[in-house]
Image (cartoon, rainbow, N blue to C red):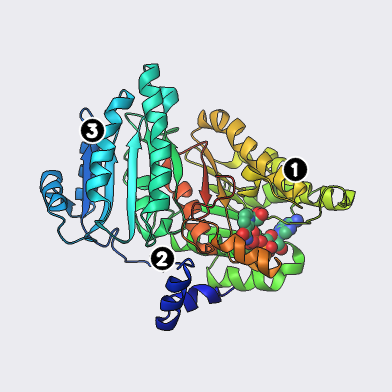
Protein backbone atom coordinates (compact mmCIF):
# COMPACT_ATOMS: atom_id res chain seq x y z
CA UNK A 1 0.00 0.00 0.00
CA UNK A 2 1.40 3.42 -0.99
CA UNK A 3 2.38 5.79 1.84
CA UNK A 4 1.01 9.01 0.32
CA UNK A 5 2.17 11.16 3.22
CA UNK A 6 5.79 10.00 2.81
CA UNK A 7 5.67 10.74 -0.92
CA UNK A 8 4.24 14.21 -0.25
CA UNK A 9 6.67 14.99 2.61
CA UNK A 10 9.63 14.23 0.33
CA UNK A 11 8.34 16.40 -2.56
CA UNK A 12 9.68 19.96 -2.95
CA UNK A 13 6.41 21.60 -1.84
CA UNK A 14 5.71 19.03 0.85
CA UNK A 15 9.15 19.27 2.47
CA UNK A 16 8.71 22.99 3.18
CA UNK A 17 5.20 22.52 4.58
CA UNK A 18 5.92 19.59 6.89
CA UNK A 19 9.06 21.33 8.20
CA UNK A 20 7.04 24.48 8.97
CA UNK A 21 4.35 22.46 10.74
CA UNK A 22 6.94 20.40 12.66
CA UNK A 23 5.61 17.12 11.20
CA UNK A 24 7.84 14.07 10.66
CA UNK A 25 9.59 13.70 7.29
CA UNK A 26 9.98 9.99 6.58
CA UNK A 27 13.46 9.66 5.05
CA UNK A 28 13.91 7.53 1.92
CA UNK A 29 15.59 4.31 3.06
CA UNK A 30 18.52 2.61 1.33
CA UNK A 31 17.35 -0.89 0.38
CA UNK A 32 19.42 -3.66 -1.13
CA UNK A 33 19.47 -4.55 -4.83
CA UNK A 34 21.67 -7.40 -6.10
CA UNK A 35 25.13 -6.11 -7.00
CA UNK A 36 24.99 -3.17 -4.55
CA UNK A 37 28.17 -2.49 -2.60
CA UNK A 38 27.99 -3.42 1.09
CA UNK A 39 28.20 0.24 2.17
CA UNK A 40 28.02 3.59 0.39
CA UNK A 41 31.21 5.09 1.82
CA UNK A 42 34.05 4.64 4.28
CA UNK A 43 33.52 2.98 7.67
CA UNK A 44 35.08 4.04 10.95
CA UNK A 45 35.90 1.26 13.42
CA UNK A 46 37.10 2.30 16.87
CA UNK A 47 37.33 0.58 20.25
CA UNK A 48 37.54 1.17 23.98
CA UNK A 49 40.93 0.04 25.35
CA UNK A 50 41.10 -3.74 25.55
CA UNK A 51 38.42 -4.36 22.90
CA UNK A 52 38.67 -7.87 21.45
CA UNK A 53 36.47 -7.54 18.37
CA UNK A 54 37.76 -4.45 16.51
CA UNK A 55 40.66 -6.33 14.85
CA UNK A 56 38.26 -9.07 13.68
CA UNK A 57 35.80 -6.50 12.33
CA UNK A 58 38.53 -4.58 10.51
CA UNK A 59 39.80 -7.80 8.91
CA UNK A 60 36.31 -8.87 7.78
CA UNK A 61 35.53 -5.45 6.30
CA UNK A 62 38.90 -5.11 4.67
CA UNK A 63 38.47 -8.48 2.96
CA UNK A 64 34.97 -7.42 1.88
CA UNK A 65 36.54 -4.45 0.07
CA UNK A 66 35.23 -1.78 2.48
CA UNK A 67 37.32 1.40 2.90
CA UNK A 68 38.25 1.86 6.56
CA UNK A 69 38.96 5.28 8.07
CA UNK A 70 41.82 5.67 10.46
CA UNK A 71 40.34 6.45 13.93
CA UNK A 72 43.06 9.00 14.81
CA UNK A 73 42.60 10.94 11.57
CA UNK A 74 38.80 10.76 11.91
CA UNK A 75 39.00 12.19 15.44
CA UNK A 76 41.12 15.13 14.23
CA UNK A 77 38.73 15.80 11.32
CA UNK A 78 35.69 15.61 13.58
CA UNK A 79 37.40 17.97 16.07
CA UNK A 80 37.97 20.47 13.26
CA UNK A 81 34.26 20.03 12.41
CA UNK A 82 35.19 19.06 8.86
CA UNK A 83 32.59 18.06 6.27
CA UNK A 84 29.71 16.32 8.01
CA UNK A 85 28.05 13.33 6.37
CA UNK A 86 31.02 11.47 4.98
CA UNK A 87 30.96 8.07 6.73
CA UNK A 88 28.70 5.14 5.85
CA UNK A 89 28.99 3.51 9.27
CA UNK A 90 30.36 3.94 12.77
CA UNK A 91 31.36 0.72 14.53
CA UNK A 92 32.48 0.85 18.14
CA UNK A 93 33.92 -2.14 19.95
CA UNK A 94 32.91 -1.76 23.61
CA UNK A 95 34.01 -5.27 24.68
CA UNK A 96 36.90 -3.73 26.62
CA UNK A 97 34.53 -1.79 28.91
CA UNK A 98 34.61 -3.46 32.34
CA UNK A 99 33.00 -0.79 34.55
CA UNK A 100 30.62 2.12 34.09
CA UNK A 101 33.29 4.84 34.25
CA UNK A 102 34.76 3.45 31.04
CA UNK A 103 31.51 4.10 29.17
CA UNK A 104 32.93 7.60 28.74
CA UNK A 105 34.84 6.19 25.74
CA UNK A 106 31.50 5.80 23.93
CA UNK A 107 30.47 9.37 24.73
CA UNK A 108 33.80 10.65 23.40
CA UNK A 109 33.43 8.66 20.18
CA UNK A 110 29.79 9.40 19.39
CA UNK A 111 30.03 13.02 20.54
CA UNK A 112 32.80 13.60 18.01
CA UNK A 113 31.20 11.58 15.20
CA UNK A 114 27.51 12.43 15.69
CA UNK A 115 27.23 14.48 12.49
CA UNK A 116 29.47 12.43 10.23
CA UNK A 117 27.03 9.78 9.00
CA UNK A 118 25.76 9.69 5.43
CA UNK A 119 21.97 9.26 4.93
CA UNK A 120 20.90 5.67 5.81
CA UNK A 121 24.13 5.41 7.83
CA UNK A 122 24.77 2.58 10.22
CA UNK A 123 25.81 2.52 13.88
CA UNK A 124 26.92 -0.78 15.40
CA UNK A 125 28.14 -1.16 18.97
CA UNK A 126 29.77 -4.47 19.88
CA UNK A 127 29.75 -5.81 23.42
CA UNK A 128 29.76 -8.85 25.68
CA UNK A 129 26.33 -10.13 26.76
CA UNK A 130 25.84 -9.30 30.46
CA UNK A 131 25.17 -12.98 31.23
CA UNK A 132 28.61 -13.85 29.80
CA UNK A 133 30.53 -11.22 31.81
CA UNK A 134 33.05 -12.31 34.42
CA UNK A 135 32.21 -9.63 37.03
CA UNK A 136 29.05 -7.76 38.11
CA UNK A 137 30.47 -4.32 37.24
CA UNK A 138 31.35 -5.45 33.75
CA UNK A 139 27.84 -6.90 33.33
CA UNK A 140 26.28 -3.60 34.43
CA UNK A 141 28.41 -1.55 32.03
CA UNK A 142 27.66 -3.91 29.15
CA UNK A 143 23.92 -3.84 29.90
CA UNK A 144 24.09 -0.03 29.91
CA UNK A 145 25.05 -0.08 26.23
CA UNK A 146 21.42 -0.86 25.35
CA UNK A 147 20.26 2.56 26.50
CA UNK A 148 22.95 4.35 24.56
CA UNK A 149 22.33 2.44 21.33
CA UNK A 150 18.56 2.75 21.44
CA UNK A 151 18.90 6.50 22.04
CA UNK A 152 21.29 6.93 19.13
CA UNK A 153 18.72 5.12 16.97
CA UNK A 154 16.27 7.84 17.89
CA UNK A 155 18.73 10.75 17.54
CA UNK A 156 20.76 10.34 14.38
CA UNK A 157 17.86 10.39 11.87
CA UNK A 158 18.04 10.58 8.06
CA UNK A 159 17.30 6.86 7.70
CA UNK A 160 20.20 5.76 9.91
CA UNK A 161 19.92 2.72 12.17
CA UNK A 162 21.70 1.67 15.38
CA UNK A 163 22.19 -1.82 16.81
CA UNK A 164 23.93 -3.50 19.71
CA UNK A 165 25.61 -6.81 18.95
CA UNK A 166 26.71 -8.96 21.88
CA UNK A 167 29.21 -11.53 20.63
CA UNK A 168 31.15 -14.33 22.33
CA UNK A 169 34.91 -14.43 21.59
CA UNK A 170 34.73 -17.02 18.79
CA UNK A 171 31.41 -15.82 17.32
CA UNK A 172 31.12 -15.96 13.53
CA UNK A 173 30.16 -12.30 13.04
CA UNK A 174 30.56 -11.69 9.33
CA UNK A 175 27.00 -12.50 8.22
CA UNK A 176 25.56 -10.24 10.93
CA UNK A 177 27.95 -7.39 10.11
CA UNK A 178 27.10 -7.67 6.44
CA UNK A 179 23.37 -7.70 7.14
CA UNK A 180 23.46 -4.72 9.49
CA UNK A 181 25.74 -2.60 7.28
CA UNK A 182 23.84 -3.25 4.05
CA UNK A 183 20.53 -1.98 2.73
CA UNK A 184 19.04 -5.35 3.71
CA UNK A 185 18.50 -4.07 7.27
CA UNK A 186 16.81 -0.81 6.16
CA UNK A 187 13.90 -1.12 8.64
CA UNK A 188 15.76 -2.80 11.53
CA UNK A 189 16.86 -0.40 14.27
CA UNK A 190 17.36 -0.28 18.03
CA UNK A 191 17.91 -4.05 18.20
CA UNK A 192 20.03 -6.12 20.54
CA UNK A 193 21.42 -9.20 18.80
CA UNK A 194 23.30 -12.04 20.44
CA UNK A 195 25.81 -14.14 18.51
CA UNK A 196 27.17 -17.30 20.09
CA UNK A 197 29.67 -19.86 18.88
CA UNK A 198 28.84 -21.58 15.62
CA UNK A 199 26.13 -24.19 16.20
CA UNK A 200 26.70 -27.71 14.96
CA UNK A 201 29.00 -28.94 12.28
CA UNK A 202 29.25 -25.66 10.35
CA UNK A 203 32.64 -24.24 11.32
CA UNK A 204 32.91 -20.57 12.25
CA UNK A 205 34.03 -18.50 9.30
CA UNK A 206 33.03 -21.20 6.79
CA UNK A 207 33.19 -19.67 3.34
CA UNK A 208 29.85 -18.35 2.18
CA UNK A 209 28.98 -17.14 -1.31
CA UNK A 210 27.51 -13.84 -0.15
CA UNK A 211 25.55 -13.35 -3.39
CA UNK A 212 23.98 -16.86 -3.32
CA UNK A 213 24.30 -18.02 0.30
CA UNK A 214 21.38 -20.45 0.00
CA UNK A 215 22.48 -22.24 -3.18
CA UNK A 216 21.56 -25.92 -2.91
CA UNK A 217 19.24 -25.38 0.08
CA UNK A 218 15.57 -26.37 0.26
CA UNK A 219 13.35 -23.79 1.98
CA UNK A 220 9.70 -24.04 3.04
CA UNK A 221 7.68 -20.83 3.43
CA UNK A 222 4.10 -20.99 4.74
CA UNK A 223 1.54 -18.32 3.83
CA UNK A 224 3.57 -17.58 0.71
CA UNK A 225 0.82 -16.56 -1.72
CA UNK A 226 0.95 -12.88 -0.86
CA UNK A 227 2.26 -10.16 1.48
CA UNK A 228 5.26 -10.90 3.66
CA UNK A 229 5.29 -14.61 2.76
CA UNK A 230 5.58 -13.89 -0.96
CA UNK A 231 8.46 -11.49 -0.26
CA UNK A 232 10.21 -14.14 1.87
CA UNK A 233 9.86 -16.70 -0.93
CA UNK A 234 11.28 -14.25 -3.48
CA UNK A 235 14.26 -13.24 -1.33
CA UNK A 236 15.16 -16.83 -0.39
CA UNK A 237 14.96 -17.79 -4.08
CA UNK A 238 17.09 -14.78 -5.02
CA UNK A 239 19.66 -16.05 -2.51
CA UNK A 240 19.74 -19.41 -4.28
CA UNK A 241 17.24 -21.61 -2.40
CA UNK A 242 14.76 -24.02 -3.94
CA UNK A 243 11.57 -22.66 -2.35
CA UNK A 244 8.45 -24.64 -1.50
CA UNK A 245 5.71 -22.02 -1.32
CA UNK A 246 2.78 -23.22 0.82
CA UNK A 247 -0.65 -21.64 1.19
CA UNK A 248 -4.33 -22.56 1.48
CA UNK A 249 -6.06 -24.11 -1.58
CA UNK A 250 -8.17 -20.92 -1.93
CA UNK A 251 -4.96 -19.01 -2.71
CA UNK A 252 -3.99 -21.55 -5.38
CA UNK A 253 -3.80 -19.09 -8.28
CA UNK A 254 -1.45 -16.46 -6.81
CA UNK A 255 0.53 -19.28 -5.20
CA UNK A 256 1.11 -20.99 -8.55
CA UNK A 257 2.08 -17.65 -10.15
CA UNK A 258 4.61 -16.99 -7.40
CA UNK A 259 6.08 -20.50 -7.61
CA UNK A 260 6.47 -20.08 -11.39
CA UNK A 261 8.11 -16.69 -10.98
CA UNK A 262 10.73 -17.98 -8.53
CA UNK A 263 11.06 -21.43 -10.14
CA UNK A 264 9.96 -23.02 -6.93
CA UNK A 265 7.19 -25.43 -5.93
CA UNK A 266 3.59 -24.59 -4.97
CA UNK A 267 2.05 -26.65 -2.19
CA UNK A 268 -1.64 -26.15 -1.43
CA UNK A 269 -2.22 -27.03 2.19
CA UNK A 270 -4.16 -25.61 5.12
CA UNK A 271 -1.66 -25.72 7.99
CA UNK A 272 -4.49 -26.30 10.47
CA UNK A 273 -5.78 -29.45 8.74
CA UNK A 274 -5.51 -32.54 10.93
CA UNK A 275 -3.38 -34.34 8.33
CA UNK A 276 -1.20 -31.29 7.48
CA UNK A 277 1.88 -32.35 9.54
CA UNK A 278 1.93 -35.84 7.98
CA UNK A 279 1.25 -34.60 4.45
CA UNK A 280 3.95 -31.97 4.72
CA UNK A 281 6.52 -34.34 6.21
CA UNK A 282 5.70 -36.86 3.47
CA UNK A 283 6.07 -34.23 0.73
CA UNK A 284 9.45 -33.03 2.02
CA UNK A 285 10.75 -36.55 2.56
CA UNK A 286 9.62 -37.87 -0.84
CA UNK A 287 10.69 -34.88 -2.94
CA UNK A 288 13.83 -33.69 -1.18
CA UNK A 289 14.71 -36.07 1.65
CA UNK A 290 15.14 -33.04 3.94
CA UNK A 291 14.32 -29.36 4.43
CA UNK A 292 17.09 -26.86 5.26
CA UNK A 293 15.07 -23.76 6.07
CA UNK A 294 11.54 -23.64 7.53
CA UNK A 295 9.75 -20.29 7.76
CA UNK A 296 6.45 -20.31 9.67
CA UNK A 297 4.90 -17.15 8.24
CA UNK A 298 1.19 -18.04 7.77
CA UNK A 299 -0.84 -15.93 10.15
CA UNK A 300 -4.29 -14.43 10.57
CA UNK A 301 -5.99 -11.78 12.70
CA UNK A 302 -9.55 -11.85 14.09
CA UNK A 303 -9.59 -8.64 16.12
CA UNK A 304 -12.14 -7.95 18.91
CA UNK A 305 -11.75 -6.90 22.53
CA UNK A 306 -11.73 -9.99 24.68
CA UNK A 307 -15.26 -9.42 26.03
CA UNK A 308 -16.68 -9.33 22.50
CA UNK A 309 -14.47 -11.98 20.95
CA UNK A 310 -16.18 -15.24 19.97
CA UNK A 311 -14.62 -18.57 20.87
CA UNK A 312 -14.31 -19.24 17.12
CA UNK A 313 -12.22 -16.07 16.69
CA UNK A 314 -9.97 -17.08 19.56
CA UNK A 315 -9.58 -20.66 18.32
CA UNK A 316 -8.92 -19.75 14.69
CA UNK A 317 -6.06 -17.38 15.52
CA UNK A 318 -4.53 -19.70 18.10
CA UNK A 319 -4.60 -22.60 15.67
CA UNK A 320 -3.11 -20.90 12.59
CA UNK A 321 -0.54 -18.73 14.37
CA UNK A 322 0.73 -21.11 17.03
CA UNK A 323 -0.72 -24.60 17.63
CA UNK A 324 -0.50 -25.78 14.00
CA UNK A 325 3.12 -24.60 13.85
CA UNK A 326 3.95 -26.71 16.91
CA UNK A 327 2.25 -29.76 15.38
CA UNK A 328 4.11 -29.23 12.11
CA UNK A 329 7.41 -28.78 13.92
CA UNK A 330 6.85 -32.09 15.71
CA UNK A 331 6.51 -33.80 12.32
CA UNK A 332 9.24 -32.09 10.30
CA UNK A 333 12.04 -30.99 12.63
CA UNK A 334 13.71 -34.37 12.19
CA UNK A 335 14.06 -33.50 8.50
CA UNK A 336 16.24 -30.46 9.31
CA UNK A 337 19.90 -31.47 8.96
CA UNK A 338 22.79 -29.90 10.89
CA UNK A 339 23.01 -26.32 9.62
CA UNK A 340 19.20 -26.22 9.42
CA UNK A 341 17.23 -23.08 10.18
CA UNK A 342 13.83 -22.77 11.87
CA UNK A 343 12.39 -19.26 11.58
CA UNK A 344 9.22 -17.99 13.19
CA UNK A 345 7.25 -14.83 12.42
CA UNK A 346 6.16 -13.09 15.62
CA UNK A 347 5.04 -9.44 15.90
CA UNK A 348 5.71 -6.38 18.06
CA UNK A 349 2.14 -7.03 19.27
CA UNK A 350 3.47 -10.20 20.89
CA UNK A 351 5.91 -8.02 22.86
CA UNK A 352 3.72 -5.00 23.67
CA UNK A 353 0.18 -6.42 23.55
CA UNK A 354 -2.52 -4.53 21.68
CA UNK A 355 -6.12 -3.54 22.35
CA UNK A 356 -8.45 -5.83 20.40
CA UNK A 357 -5.76 -8.45 19.80
CA UNK A 358 -5.66 -10.72 22.87
CA UNK A 359 -5.82 -13.77 20.60
CA UNK A 360 -3.17 -12.53 18.15
CA UNK A 361 -0.79 -11.21 20.86
CA UNK A 362 -1.09 -14.51 22.75
CA UNK A 363 0.07 -16.42 19.69
CA UNK A 364 2.87 -14.01 18.82
CA UNK A 365 4.20 -14.10 22.40
CA UNK A 366 3.89 -17.90 22.26
CA UNK A 367 6.07 -17.91 19.16
CA UNK A 368 8.77 -16.08 21.14
CA UNK A 369 8.48 -18.74 23.83
CA UNK A 370 8.88 -21.39 21.17
CA UNK A 371 12.15 -19.80 20.03
CA UNK A 372 13.46 -19.56 23.58
CA UNK A 373 12.61 -23.13 24.49
CA UNK A 374 13.79 -24.75 21.25
CA UNK A 375 17.06 -22.81 20.81
CA UNK A 376 19.15 -24.87 23.28
CA UNK A 377 17.48 -28.14 22.25
CA UNK A 378 18.08 -27.63 18.53
CA UNK A 379 21.60 -26.23 19.06
CA UNK A 380 22.69 -29.73 20.03
CA UNK A 381 21.82 -30.78 16.47
CA UNK A 382 23.41 -27.73 14.83
CA UNK A 383 20.03 -26.17 14.01
CA UNK A 384 19.26 -22.53 14.82
CA UNK A 385 15.84 -21.05 15.66
CA UNK A 386 15.03 -17.34 15.60
CA UNK A 387 12.06 -15.06 15.16
CA UNK A 388 11.36 -11.78 13.43
CA UNK A 389 8.88 -9.47 15.10
CA UNK A 390 7.57 -7.10 12.43
CA UNK A 391 6.08 -3.76 13.35
CA UNK A 392 3.92 -1.89 10.85
CA UNK A 393 4.53 -3.52 7.47
CA UNK A 394 2.63 -2.34 4.38
CA UNK A 395 0.50 -5.38 3.44
CA UNK A 396 -3.14 -6.40 2.96
CA UNK A 397 -3.26 -7.02 6.73
CA UNK A 398 -2.35 -3.40 7.66
CA UNK A 399 -4.32 -1.93 4.73
CA UNK A 400 -7.45 -3.16 6.54
CA UNK A 401 -6.71 -0.97 9.61
CA UNK A 402 -8.93 2.10 10.25
CA UNK A 403 -7.23 5.07 8.55
CA UNK A 404 -6.38 7.13 11.68
CA UNK A 405 -4.96 4.09 13.47
CA UNK A 406 -2.98 3.11 10.38
CA UNK A 407 -1.46 6.59 10.06
CA UNK A 408 -0.45 6.64 13.75
CA UNK A 409 0.95 3.13 13.54
CA UNK A 410 3.07 4.09 10.51
CA UNK A 411 4.61 7.16 12.11
CA UNK A 412 5.26 6.00 15.69
CA UNK A 413 8.76 4.74 15.04
CA UNK A 414 12.23 6.24 14.57
CA UNK A 415 12.00 6.09 10.77
CA UNK A 416 8.47 7.66 10.65
CA UNK A 417 7.19 5.15 8.11
CA UNK A 418 5.93 1.61 7.70
CA UNK A 419 8.29 -1.10 6.54
CA UNK A 420 7.96 -3.18 3.37
CA UNK A 421 7.49 -6.96 3.20
CA UNK A 422 11.00 -7.20 1.76
CA UNK A 423 12.44 -5.76 5.00
CA UNK A 424 11.07 -8.74 6.93
CA UNK A 425 12.22 -11.10 4.19
CA UNK A 426 15.81 -9.79 4.24
CA UNK A 427 15.99 -10.32 8.00
CA UNK A 428 14.78 -13.88 7.55
CA UNK A 429 17.38 -14.42 4.80
CA UNK A 430 20.08 -13.29 7.26
CA UNK A 431 18.86 -15.88 9.82
CA UNK A 432 18.77 -18.49 7.02
CA UNK A 433 22.33 -17.84 5.82
CA UNK A 434 24.93 -20.56 6.50
CA UNK A 435 27.07 -17.71 7.88
CA UNK A 436 24.55 -17.17 10.70
CA UNK A 437 25.43 -20.39 12.52
CA UNK A 438 26.02 -18.45 15.77
CA UNK A 439 22.70 -16.61 15.60
CA UNK A 440 20.13 -18.55 17.59
CA UNK A 441 17.46 -17.76 20.18
CA UNK A 442 17.12 -14.20 18.88
CA UNK A 443 13.92 -12.22 18.41
CA UNK A 444 14.72 -9.35 16.07
CA UNK A 445 12.14 -6.65 15.52
CA UNK A 446 11.69 -5.31 12.01
CA UNK A 447 9.83 -2.23 13.12
CA UNK A 448 11.89 0.90 12.41
CA UNK A 449 12.38 1.09 16.21
CA UNK A 450 8.66 1.25 16.92
CA UNK A 451 7.59 2.97 20.11
CA UNK A 452 5.21 0.04 20.73
CA UNK A 453 6.76 -2.36 23.19
CA UNK A 454 9.90 -0.27 23.28
N1 LIG B 1 1.61 -6.92 8.07
C1 LIG B 1 2.14 -6.58 9.23
O1 LIG B 1 2.28 -5.40 9.54
C2 LIG B 1 2.58 -7.65 10.20
C3 LIG B 1 3.10 -7.22 11.41
C4 LIG B 1 3.54 -8.17 12.33
C5 LIG B 1 3.47 -9.51 12.02
N2 LIG B 1 2.95 -9.90 10.84
C6 LIG B 1 2.90 -11.36 10.58
O2 LIG B 1 3.49 -11.64 9.33
C7 LIG B 1 2.88 -12.79 8.74
C8 LIG B 1 2.40 -12.47 7.33
O3 LIG B 1 1.52 -11.36 7.41
P1 LIG B 1 0.94 -10.62 6.12
O4 LIG B 1 0.73 -9.22 6.51
O5 LIG B 1 1.76 -10.94 4.93
O6 LIG B 1 -0.49 -11.34 6.04
P2 LIG B 1 -1.42 -11.68 4.79
O7 LIG B 1 -2.77 -11.82 5.34
O8 LIG B 1 -1.19 -10.70 3.68
O9 LIG B 1 -0.85 -13.10 4.32
C9 LIG B 1 -0.95 -14.26 5.12
C10 LIG B 1 -0.91 -15.49 4.24
O10 LIG B 1 -1.07 -16.63 5.09
C11 LIG B 1 -1.97 -17.52 4.46
N3 LIG B 1 -2.65 -18.37 5.43
C12 LIG B 1 -3.60 -17.99 6.34
N4 LIG B 1 -4.08 -19.07 6.98
C13 LIG B 1 -3.43 -20.15 6.49
C14 LIG B 1 -3.51 -21.54 6.75
N5 LIG B 1 -4.37 -22.03 7.65
N6 LIG B 1 -2.72 -22.37 6.02
C15 LIG B 1 -1.85 -21.88 5.11
N7 LIG B 1 -1.74 -20.57 4.82
C16 LIG B 1 -2.52 -19.72 5.49
C17 LIG B 1 -2.96 -16.61 3.76
O11 LIG B 1 -3.69 -17.29 2.76
C18 LIG B 1 -2.04 -15.52 3.23
O12 LIG B 1 -1.55 -15.83 1.94
C19 LIG B 1 1.76 -13.20 9.70
O13 LIG B 1 2.22 -14.22 10.57
C20 LIG B 1 1.50 -11.92 10.48
O14 LIG B 1 0.95 -12.17 11.73
C21 LIG B 1 2.49 -9.01 9.92
Q: Is residue 156 left or right of residue 40?
A: right
**Which of label 3 and label 1 is nearer to you?**
3
Is the CB atom of the residue marked by disc 3 within 8 angstroms of ligand 1's nearest atom?
Answer: no
The answer to whether any part of residue 435 appears in the image is no
Within 10 angstroms of label 1, few (less than 14), some, or many (20 or more) residues?
Answer: some
- Looking at marks 3 and 1 on the same chain, the residue that comes earlier in the sequence is marked by 3
Q: Viewer-proximal residue, 63 or 388?
A: 388
Q: According to the image, label 1 marks what residue? A: 323
Q: Position of residue 120 (x, y in %)?
A: 35, 61
Q: Viewer-proximal residue, 380 or 146?
A: 146
Please report contact status of discs 3 and 1: CB closer than 8 Å, yes or no.
no
User: Which residue reaches farthest front?
Assistant: 20
Q: Position of residue 264 (x, y in %)?
A: 56, 64
Q: Secondary structure at mark 1?
A: helix
If the picture is divided into quarters, which one holds ligand 1? bottom right
Please report contact status of discs 1 and 2: CB closer than 8 Å, yes or no.
no
Q: According to the image, label 2 marks what residue? A: 29
Dividing the picture into quadrants, the one containing residue 86 is bottom left
Q: CA distance from mark 2 to mark 3?
A: 30 Å
Q: According to the image, label 3 marks what residue? A: 48
Q: Position of residue 141 (x, y in %)?
A: 36, 27
Residue at 60% from the left image edge and 56% from the top image edge: 221
Amino acid sequence: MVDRYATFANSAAGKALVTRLGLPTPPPLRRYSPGDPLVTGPVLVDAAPGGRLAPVVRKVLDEAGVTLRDPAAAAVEAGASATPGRLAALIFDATGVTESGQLRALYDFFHAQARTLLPSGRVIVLGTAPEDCAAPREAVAQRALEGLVRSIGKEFGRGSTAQLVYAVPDAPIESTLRFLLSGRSAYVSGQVIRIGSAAGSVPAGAPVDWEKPLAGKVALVTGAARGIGAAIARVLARDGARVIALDVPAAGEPLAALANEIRGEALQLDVTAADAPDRLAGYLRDRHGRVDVVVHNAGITRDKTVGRMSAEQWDAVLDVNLSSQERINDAILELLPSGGRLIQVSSVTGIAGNRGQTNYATTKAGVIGLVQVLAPILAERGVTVNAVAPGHIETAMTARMPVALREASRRLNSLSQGGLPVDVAETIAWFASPGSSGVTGNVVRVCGQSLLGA
